[in-house]
Image (cartoon, grey):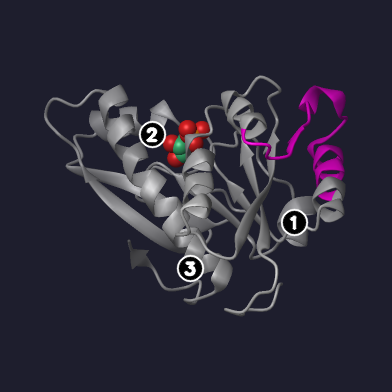
Amino acid sequence: MPPASFEQASPYKLAVFISGTGSNMQAIHHAILDGTLTNTELALVVSNKADALGLDYARQHLIPTFTLDAKEFDSPEDYDQVLLTELNALNIDFIALAGYLKILTPILTTAYEGRITNIHPSLLPAYGGKNMFGAKVHASVLANGEHFTGCTVHVVTDDIDSGPVLGQRTVPVLAEDTVERLAQRVQAEEHELYPAVLDSFINQAQPVSSIENY
Ligand code: GRF
């Protein structure tokens, strides 16, 4: 674990893992550029999909990228071992999962224990777990007639969507909401929440166990 210090000489190196659009990765990058996510360098964007849209943004902004196709590996552990070797080679300090649709194995969760975060489009523990991701989350929220939903940033452990919660934002569900409209409003909150939580988490300004509403 890197030492906590406000006088960190060189910024902490963050790797963001994506599988798709990468809008949260872009929000994190913007926050680094505008100085609201401090002491942090976006040192690597990892994708398990070679055609992930977010990779285009990373390349345009000269952020190093690393893609690995799971089909080339015998097991998820072999896959994560190659990833870990790359992360170590680049001295990556923290990992932020942002729409990464692949479950991490203990190879990574152990090596980076307490240093991996994820963003989830619901108020965990509600609407979390193995098959709860993307549009499915919002469709379930609407089907159940919920009045509120939101998004959660949490520490990643081997139990999916169950690690300590670092921050949440609440979003009201409106009568006229569709899955797409609700997803859009939740994502707008994600883009503010994730960089703010990462700033606290990476710089250890708050204990991991305290939940903040940013
Ligand atoms: C986000 O809505 C996040 O909550 C979920 O996956 C989505 C990723 O979107 N884990 P993007 O790739 O950051 O645009």
The kind of secondary structure element at disc 3 is: helix
The residues tagged by marks 2 and 3 sit, at their Cα atoms, a distance apart of: 27 Å
Quarter of the image for residue 165 reads bottom left
Mark closest to the chain's N terminus, 2 or 3: 2
Please tell me the numbered disc located at residue 60.
Answer: none
Q: Earlier in the sequence, mark 1 or mark 2?
A: 1
| Circle 1 crowding by C-alpha within 10 Å: few under 14, some 14–19, many from 20 | some
Q: Nearer the viewer, mark 2 or mark 3?
A: 3
Q: Which mark is residue 92?
A: 1
Residue projecting furthest to the top: 51
Quadrant location of the N terminus in the rendered image: bottom right
Q: Is residue 51 left or right of residue 180?
A: right
Q: Quadrant of the C terminus?
A: bottom left
Residue 212, position as x, y percentages in the image = 35, 67
Q: Residue 75: say if magenta.
A: yes
Q: Position of residue 118 (x, y in %)?
A: 53, 50
Seen at 40% across and 28% down, the residue is 136
Span colored in magenta: 61-84
